[in-house]
Image (cartoon, rainbow, N blue to C red):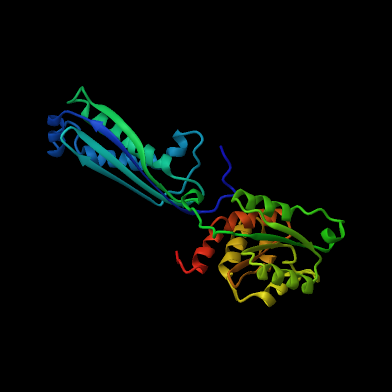
C-alpha cells in the first residue's frame, strides 16, 4: 500500500454513477413498490452507504478513510435506474474508490431485488463523474519571469565543516515546479543575512527560502534578520509548517521560523534539519505559490 504519510489532510470529494438496465414494466413496478422484495431503493441506498465504509476491506490497496458524508441518489427512467454516489472526506488521499464502490454495490442491490421479476437486467457504465481535492486539484499561478533564491545559514556549512543537505532539498523541490533558484551559503551572521535578503529583494527575486537559524541556539539569527527586513508577517504559512511537523515530531514546536512579505517578495524561514525542511515543504507547497496571485491583486 502506497505511503501517504507525507500528504496533508484536505477536503476531498468524489461522485460516481452506475446504471442498471431493466424492462419498462419492471421499473413501473419499482415506482409503485409492487415487488416481492419491497423498498428496493431504500435497501440499495443502505447497501451503498455500507459499501463505501468498507471499501478498504474490499479493495486491497485502498487506505481506510474516515468518511464524513455519503449520499446515494437514484434516477428512475423508462428503461434504467441511474445510481449516483457522492462521498466526502477531509483526509490525505482521494475518495473516488469509495464513491465507485458505493455506486457499484447499490446497483448490485437493485439487481438482486429486481431479478425475481426481470431476467434481462444488466449493470452498465460504472464511472467516476467528478473528483475534487488534493494537490492535483490546485494549479497555482506563477508570475512571468519568476525568480527564487535559497539561502543556507550555517557557520559549519560556511566554513566547509558541515555538508548542506537542507538547501539541496529545497532546490530540488523548487525544480519540480520549474523554478531554478540561486543558492547561497552564509554564516549565522545577522548583518550578512540582512544584506543578502535586501540584495535579493532589490534584484526582484520573488521567493526567498532560508534554511537554518530558526532554533533557540545563541547563533540562530535568521528570524531576527527576516523581521528586520519584512513589511509584514504572514503567520499562517509557519502555522501550517509547525502544525504539520508537530504531528510527526514534538520538536517542531521549537522552531521560530517566520514567513514575511517584502514588497512582492515572499521570505520563508525553514528549519535547518533536512527532515524539518522536507516536512515544511510538504506542508506549504504548492499552495504557498497562491500568494503571488493575491499580491498581484487577483484575489483567490
Q: Is residue 27 left or right of residue 163?
A: left
**Where does the N terminus fall, quadrant-wise?**
top right
Q: Is residue 167 left or right of residue 56?
A: right
Residue nearest the viewer, comparing 218 with 298: 298
Residue 223 can be seen in this image? no
**140 up-or-down from 188: above or below:** above
**108 up-or-down from 251: above or below:** above
* Place of residue 219 in the rendered image (x, y in percent of width and height, measured from the top left): 80, 70
Quarter of the image for residue 85 reads top left
* Place of residue 18 in the rendered image (x, y in percent of width and height, measured from the top left): 30, 36
Residue nearest the viewer, comparing 275 with 228: 228
**7 up-or-down from 147: above or below:** above
* Place of residue 32 in the rendered image (x, y in percent of width and height, measured from the top left): 12, 38
Residue drawn 67% across the image and 50% down it? 172
Q: Is residue 122 left or right of residue 93?
A: left
Q: How many marks?
A: 0
**Where does the C terminus fall, quadrant-wise?**
bottom left
**182 up-or-down from 111: above or below:** below
Amino acid at each position: 500500500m502506497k505511503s501517504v504519510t507525507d500528504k496533508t489532510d484536505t477536503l476531498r470529494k468524489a461522485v460516481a454513477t452506475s446504471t442498471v438496465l431493466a424492462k419498462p414494466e419492471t421499473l413501473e413496478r419499482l415506482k409503485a413498490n409492487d415487488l416481492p422484495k419491497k423498498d428496493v431503493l431504500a435497501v440499495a441506498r443502505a447497501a451503498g452507504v455500507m459499501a463505501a465504509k468498507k471499501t478498504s476491506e474490499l479493495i486491497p490497496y485502498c487506505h481506510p478513510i474516515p468518511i464524513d458524508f455519503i449520499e446515494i441518489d437514484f434516477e428512475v427512467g423508462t428503461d434504467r435506474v441511474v445510481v449516483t454516489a457522492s462521498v466526502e472526506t477531509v483526509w490525505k488521499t482521494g475518495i473516488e474508490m469509495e464513491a465507485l464502490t458505493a455506486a457499484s454495490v447499490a446497483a448490485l442491490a437493485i439487481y438482486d431485488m429486481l431479478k425475481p421479476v426481470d431476467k434481462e437486467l444488466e449493470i452498465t457504465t460504472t464511472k467516476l463523474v467528478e473528483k475534487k481535492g488534493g494537490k492535483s486539484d490546485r494549479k497555482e499561478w506563477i508570475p512571468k519571469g519568476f525568480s527564487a533564491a535559497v539561502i543556507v545559514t550555517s557557520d559549519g556549512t560556511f566554513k566547509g565543516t558541515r555538508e548542506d543537505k537542507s538547501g539541496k532539498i529545497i532546490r530540488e523541490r523548487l525544480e519540480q515546479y520549474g523554478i531554478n533558484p540561486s543558492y547561497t551559503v552564509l554564516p549565522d551572521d545577522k548583518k550578512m543575512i540582512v544584506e543578502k535578503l535586501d540584495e535579493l529583494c532589490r534584484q526582484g527575486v520573488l521567493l526567498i527560502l532560508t534554511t537554518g537559524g530558526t532554533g533557540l541556539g545563541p547563533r540562530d539569527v535568521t528570524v531576527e534578520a527576516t523581521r528586520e527586513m519584512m513589511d509584514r508577517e504572514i503567520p499562517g504559512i509557519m502555522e501550517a509548517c509547525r502544525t504539520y511537523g508537530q504531528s510527526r515530531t514534538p520538536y517542531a514546536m521549537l522552531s521560530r521560523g517566520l514567513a514575511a512579505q517584502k514588497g512582492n517578495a515572499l521570505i520563508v524561514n525553514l528549519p535547518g534539519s533536512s527532515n524539518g525542511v522536507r516536512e515544511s515543504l510538504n506542508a506549504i507547497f504548492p499552495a504557498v505559490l497562491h500568494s503571488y496571485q493575491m499580491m498581484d491583486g487577483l484575489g483567490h
